[in-house]
Image (tube, rainbow, N blue to C red):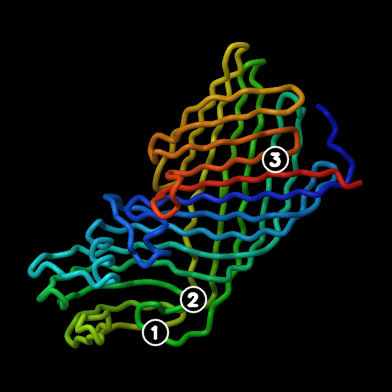
Amino acid sequence: MSSPSHALGLYVEQKTFGHSQGAPFGAITNGWNAPISDGTLSQGFLWNEAGITYAGWSLGALHRYDARVRYTSDTLEFMKNIKTQQPLTVGRQYNILLDINHFEAHGVRASYSFGDNSIWRVTVGGAYLRLDYLVSGKLVGHVVPTSDKAYDFSFDVDYFYSKDSLFDRPVAAPSGAAYTTDFSLFWRINEPLVVRAEIIDLYAKLHWPAAPHTVATGNSATKNFDANGYQYFAPAINGRESTEAYDQPLTPRAKIDIEYHHPAFDLYQRTQYTAEQIYFALGTAHSWQAWGTLYGFYTLSVGGWTMGWRAKDFNLEIGVGHWNPWKAHYGEARLSWHLIAI
């Protein structure tokens, strides 16, 4: 086993992933003036980390943003209609679902790497995070238009939050604490075959000691209209508002890259796993001893292309589902850079 470097180093790790089945990214950022598609899932993850390394150890500052939303196609269609004030179809029933789990946090992460760098290497890490923002819960209901600008609705909702976006309840923003662990592996099984794997949130505990909580039913017993005569969401509600301790769920995510190097060609396969969806990709790569590896692959489940370059202490990759960001349902970027400082 090779001994870890005792030189002091600096590192940066940045990981961004976004996938929205039903609506492209431009739908939200451009006033919903974008086509929507069949789909029931949107999820996004952001990981920003920077710090120092020494003798196999690393210590850095970490910022995370995780969001997952489940919905129905009816939900997206109705939201687009009212956001753009399109005429509604009288008598049609929209089945509404919003199931959200989202947090934002910052803190510190420490890790330790060991192994023979040319054959295998294992990294285990753990983070302590201060939780800054929370939305977690579910809304279920239905909507039936009564005219081209008005509608009846009813729903049940149970959710925890930092800001009450549904009913504008004034609350003190909560804070919490999280503990997470992660694991990564590099393994050169033989000369042509290499495996790289990582698991994020292998164990995770997110605790909010005093989170605002609402359990309620709502309906359109009273209706409100804007200057254009279009009804806007202002429900009559009945329920319970409280502040409670809450353990927010967080499931592991994983990524496995398999590389097969041949004198005539290189093959590249990536599988990314979340609790909601598996992303499978195939591609090719080419390596230069002095310059590193250039690789590219196509993710079948989202129709996205990714290009990347990996050198000894540097890795950059960018993936897109569409070259026009207003039409893109998928995007991904990764940067890993390790520098020897002293």
Asked which secondary structure carries label 2, the reply is loop
Across and down, in percent, residue 311 comes to 72, 33
Residue receiving disc 3: 123
Amino acid type, residue under disc 1 in the picture: Asp
Q: Nearer the viewer, residue 11 or 310?
A: 310
The mark nearer the N terminus, 2 or 1, is 2
Across and down, in percent, residue 163 comes to 46, 78
Residue receiving disc 1: 168
The mark nearer the N terminus, 3 or 1, is 3
Name the residue: 39% across, 41% down.
Answer: 302
Asked which secondary structure carries label 1, the reply is loop
Across and down, in percent, residue 276 comes to 39, 48
Q: Residues within 10 Å of mark 2 (few under 14, many from 20)?
A: many
Name the residue: 24% across, 61% down.
Answer: 77
From the image, which quarter does the N terminus lie in? top right
| Cα distance between the residues tagged 3 and 2 | 34 Å
Amino acid type, residue under disc 3 in the picture: Thr
Residue 314's image quarter? top right
Name the residue: 60% across, 13% down.
Answer: 262
Across and down, in percent, residue 21 comes to 35, 50
| Cα distance between the residues tagged 3 and 1 | 45 Å
Residue 79's image quarter? bottom left
Residue receiving disc 2: 162
Amino acid type, residue under disc 2 in the picture: Ser
Name the residue: 45% across, 52% down.
Answer: 325
CB under 8 Å between callouts 2 and 1? no
Q: Residues within 10 Å of mark 3 (few under 14, many from 20)?
A: some
Extreme residue in the left direction? 91
